[in-house]
Image (cartoon, grey):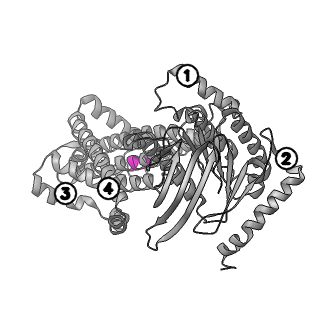
């Protein structure tokens, strides 16, 4: 796999095994380099270790073998400053309002109160949550709650944002619109983004590069460069190249998905 | 009028109707007023007891015993629940025992506790605590079970330490279930302490009821009974209001 000129994140020979019982070889070996400011997506069949890859990449899990480096420093089982994570499941805090949920990310920071307020209000406005700032998560739809979680990550101003199927529970229209918002966020923050998704169209629409992961143990079996301009949105789905990219992703993934279903060995 | 307020009014109307019916049955002689005092007489008897100060010592004794038993049950039950939650094998052993604990009338142990600790506050506190602790353990387990893994991952991703994870994530997430346990614990502590006082003690509201009963003093007995009943309803009602305020934020749709 080619190494970008200014690697922001580097994974070298990363393997993750679980002792069990039964012992499971979940991931790897994985080699991956992400350029600073790149939008990278990972697609793969269910259970291929995509979420494990994210856990290892952000420091929530330690690799059994290999190393992960973020901005040149090796990760050792904890999430370093500068990495923001958005999970697949709803991680909004039910007892806090939208504003308090977003400010939660800054509770540990030693920023002045004014700066905290500014960041929170900016994130609220950026994610279109102004009318709901004093609502509680139970009063919001699934998509709005996910926006709250993204905003909570945004206020930390992460340089690397990891998103684990953040739109998995949303309907197709909302996902497309959330994709647009994600692209806007990416352009405005200049952060490197790694998106894990099971939706091939989502990966093809949003990413600079898409990594296709094999059935377990997950390894990269294809890497697709989309060649999209930085200024793009969901209307790109009408571009003829979009169909070609999605078709290539599916052709790489089809056999792996059949393996997962037990149809092919 | 909101739906909740309508329900409350219907509830109050239902209870008032039941009290009025009892009053009517007693006053017309359908129910012998020597057996059951008319509710208005119960109320007068209770007010007389209170104004004469006859229940003061009993109140102090009973309420302080319940308060100590309640606080100890919360401390012990929460700690035990947290330990059991951390050790799945221990939980597998204890779960059925906890589930069947409510079938044990704990106050049968009171004579044993008196033999061990002599008459006084200690056996009553232990009895109240024994009655209340399992409710707290069970609610702690339910509360800890309710913490989604993703919130624990969030805590790690936000670099919260153990104490902050406990205070900022786990406790607020568990609070509604813990609160239900605390409400039950208060009721069980009250039942345990008053039952203990009723059986063998020489002080407290339970003893006051028992003494009046054995002295055929129906007026004092019903007055004290009504007072205990109203005190229990008030305490539970306050906890209910508090719990409702907590829950309202989360359950708003």
Task: Pick the quarter of the image with the N terminus of chain B.
Answer: top right
Whether discs 2 and 4 lie on one chain: the answer is no
Q: Chain of mark 1?
A: A
**Within 10 angstroms of label 4, few (less than 14), some, or many (20 or more) residues?**
some
Disc 2 marks which residue?
Answer: A236
Span of residues in magenta: B180-184
Marks 1/4 in contact by CB < 8 Å: the verdict is no
Q: Residue at x 67, y 75 (%)?
A: A259
Percent x, y of residue B84: 33, 59
Q: Residues within 10 Å of mark 3 (few under 14, many from 20)?
A: many
The verdict on residue B182 being magenta is: yes
Q: CA distance from mark 4 to mark 3?
A: 28 Å
Q: Position of residue A170 (x, y in %)?
A: 72, 51
Residue A179 is one of the magenta-drawn residues: no
- Per the rendering, the mark at residue B83 is 4
Position of B243 relative to A3 (above/below): above
Q: In the rendered structure, the residue with mark 3 lies on which chain? A: B
């Amino acid at each position: 796999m080619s190494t970008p000129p200014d690697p922001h994140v580097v994974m070298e020979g990363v393997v993750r095994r679980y002792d069990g019982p039964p012992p499971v070889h979940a991931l790897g070996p994985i080699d991956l380099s992400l350029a600073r400011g790149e939008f990278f997506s990972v697609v793969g069949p269910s259970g291929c270790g995509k979420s494990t890859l994210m856990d290892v990449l952000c420091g929530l899990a330690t690799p059994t073998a290999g190393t992960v480096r973020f901005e040149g420093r090796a990760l050792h089982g904890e999430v370093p400053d500068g990495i923001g994570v958005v999970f697949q499941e709803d991680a909004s805090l039910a007892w806090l309002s939208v504003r308090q949920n977003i400010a939660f990310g800054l509770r540990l920071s030693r920023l002045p109160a004014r700066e905290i307020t500014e960041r929170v209000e900016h994130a609220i406005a950026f994610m279109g949550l102004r009318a709901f700032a004093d609502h509680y998560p139970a009063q919001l739809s699934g998509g709005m709650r996910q926006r709250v979680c993204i905003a909570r990550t945004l206020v930390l101003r992460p340089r690397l944002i990891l998103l684990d199927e953040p739109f998995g529970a949303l309907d197709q229209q909302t996902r497309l619109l959330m994709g647009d918002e994600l692209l806007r966020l990416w352009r405005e923050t200049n952060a490197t983004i790694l998106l894990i998704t099971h939706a091939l169209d989502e990966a093809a629409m949003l990413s600079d590069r898409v990594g296709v992961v094999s059935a377990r143990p997950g390894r990269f079996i294809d890497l697709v460069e989309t060649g999209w301009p930085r200024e793009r949105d969901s209307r790109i789905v009408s571009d003829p190249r979009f169909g070609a990219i999605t078709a290539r992703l599916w052709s790489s993934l089809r056999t792996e998905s059949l393996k997962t279903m037990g149809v092919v060995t | 009028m909101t739906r909740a307020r309508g329900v409350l009014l219907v509830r109050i109307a239902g209870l008032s109707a039941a009290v009025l019916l009892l009053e009517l049955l007693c006053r017309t002689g359908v129910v012998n007023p020597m057996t059951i005092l008319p509710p208005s007489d119960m109320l007068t008897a209770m007010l007389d007891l209170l104004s004469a100060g006859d229940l003061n010592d009993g109140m102090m004794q009973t309420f302080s015993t319940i308060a100590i038993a309640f606080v100890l049950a919360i401390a012990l039950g929460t700690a035990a629940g947290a330990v059991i939650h951390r050790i799945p094998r221990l939980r597998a052993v204890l779960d059925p025992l906890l589930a069947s604990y409510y079938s044990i009338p704990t106050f049968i142990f009171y004579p044993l506790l008196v033999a061990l600790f002599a008459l006084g506050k200690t056996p009553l506190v232990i009895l109240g605590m024994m009655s209340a602790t399992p409710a707290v353990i069970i609610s702690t387990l339910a509360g800890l079970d309710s913490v989604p893994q993703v919130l624990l991952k969030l805590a790690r991703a936000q670099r919260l330490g153990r104490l902050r994870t406990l205070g900022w994530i786990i406790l607020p997430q568990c609070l509604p279930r813990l609160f239900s346990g605390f409400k039950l614990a208060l009721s069980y502590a009250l039942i345990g302490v008053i039952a203990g006082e009723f059986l063998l003690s020489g002080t407290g509201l339970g003893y006051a009821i028992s003494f009046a009963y054995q002295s055929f003093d129906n007026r004092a007995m019903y007055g004290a009974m009504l007072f205990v009943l109203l005190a229990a309803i008030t305490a539970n009602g306050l906890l209910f209001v508090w719990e409702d305020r907590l829950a309202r934020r989360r359950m708003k749709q």
